[in-house]
Image (tube, rainbow, N blue to C red):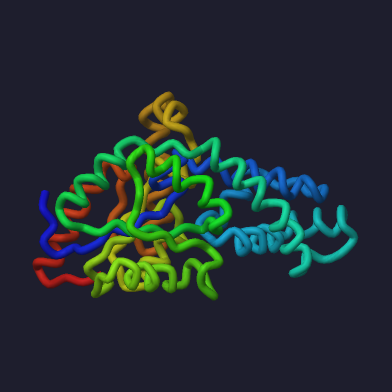
Amino acid sequence: MSCLHLKAAIFDWAGTVVDHGSRAPMGAFVAAFAQFGVEVSIEQARRPMGLPKRDHIRALLEVPEVAAAWRAAQGGDPDKAAIDRVYEVFVPMNAEAVAAHAELIPGVAEVVAALRAQGLKIGSTTGYVREIMERLLGPAATQGFAPDNLVCAGDLPEGRPAPFNIYKTLLDLQVWPAWACVKVDDTEPGIAEGVNAGCWTVGVTLTGNAAGLTVEELAALPDAQVRQLRAAATASLKGAGAHLVIDGVADLLPALAELDARLARGERP
């Protein structure tokens, strides 16, 4: 394929280009809340995925069962001070976890090299703060993923699903208009970030948060169960505004060729 109209691909990190199944944050959320005597399940922890991590903690504390558990354990309402306390514990835990989940998802390095060969710039945004991303950048680059920019949660006044991280990426990459760029993400807030910025969006169904499985776990599933996971993730991501969905970044090139053809016909996101 050759993209004549697209100028940039903007990637999410965990569950999209690294950490198949987006495993690193989950254990950290569970462990951080446990420090305060509050039990949070993996399923509960996954629901707000894609949000900046402070917003993610706020969303968890708004879950009625979690809020009740916080009041029982801490003797007060889960207010802003509670968010700050959990966040302070969570960030170093997550930083340690990402170092153990820094492996590139299969196909990422090859696809990014192909995009660069066609002249596309490679951007990235994330729900992680810079303290966490410092543990990922080196290992990812060594494996073949070194984007032209990085915008982290906390860099700007408002994170996902607001479009500001994408706006900053367009400035960093010196590309425009937004409709000549594609956001690739495995979460609803990350897709919404791209939609709100005016980009094309491609949702990733099987390598990220929706499936929550390692490469080996996914490969071991019966085909029928894989189809169920794909269908559920597709519904969620399209509900958030994804223009196309794929299993993983390894399948991105045909999707971008389709979007490039739509641009050639005069279509816009």
Q: Is residue 2 above or below residue 105?
A: below
Picture residue at 31% right of the left edge, 56% below the top: 202
Picture residue at 40% right of the left edge, 56% below the top: 237
Q: Decide if residue 234 is on the left or right side of residue 255.
A: right
Please identify the quadrant where the C terminus is shown: bottom left
Residue closer to the observer: 199 or 139: 139
Residue 117 spot, x, y in % from top left: 16, 49
Residue 86 spot, x, y in % from top left: 73, 56
Residue 196 visible in the shown view? no
Residue 106 spot, x, y in % from top left: 34, 35
Q: Decide if residue 17 is on the left or right side of residue 111.
A: right
Q: Quadrant of residue 64?
A: bottom right
Q: Is residue 22 above or below residue 57?
A: above
Picture residue at 61% right of the left edge, 42% below the top: 96
Q: Quadrant of residue 61?
A: bottom right
Residue 152 visible in the shown view? yes
